[in-house]
Image (cartoon, rainbow, N blue to C red):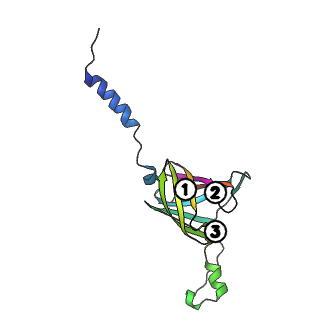
Amino acid sequence: MKRYTPYLLFVPLSIALLACVPKGSVSDQIQGVWRVTKVIDLDEKTASDPGNTHYVITERHIMTVGGKEDRPIIDKVFADMTPEEIMSQLPAGGGFMEYEIVDGKIHRTTKFALSELFEGQLIITEIETDRDSLVFRDNHHADGHLREWHMARVE
């Protein structure tokens, strides 16, 4: 009977274990600037164009801003604009959230949003990422529909 030395068993086992180590945490992988490319309502089975919507994700915070594509260019500072001109420049949506990763999901609490409906809300979001693309999947508080936000990395 042939005897194997511990070294011969250790090397292949070490290589196999190293191959299973994730390349950075989920938090590391999702940090950056993301452009939303489409939003899918999984309940209604519809897809929509999110327009000019972006997510900025740091180690502990998420900010989302959506602007209107057809905003007029007004050659004035806000102090000199009429109320109607100011309203034409506002983003279509936005929010600021704190988050943590719990059991592979984002648990985010909205600190500020353009709609007060979302403030203080805890949103639990499933994540899929390959570093260049990101998908958030959760129930939208406004209507309860399950949605996916598909994003492409900008930075």
Give the numbered dot on residue 45. Answer: none
Dot 3 falls on a residue whose secondary structure is helix
Where is 46 relative to 118, above or below?
A: above
What is the three-letter code of the residue carrying label 3?
Answer: Leu
Depth order, front residue of 58/80: 58
Residue at 58%, 91% in the rendered image: 80
Identify the residue position indicated by label 2 in the image. 38
Residue pictured at 49% horizontal, 59% vertical: 99
Residue 79: image location, x then y, percent:
56, 90
Q: Amino acid at mark 2?
A: Lys
Asked if the residue under mark 3 is in contact with the one under mark 1, i.e. CB atoms within 8 Å, the reply is no
Distance between mark 1 and mark 3 Cα atoms: 27 Å
Query: Which badge, 1 or 2, comes first in the chain's sequence?
Result: 2
Disc 1 crowd rating (10 Å Cα; few below 14, some 14-19, many 20+) is some
| Residue 77 location (% of width, % of height) | 55, 87
Q: The N terminus is located in which quarter?
A: top left
Magenta residues, as a range?
Answer: 128-144
Q: Disc 3 designates what residue?
A: 117
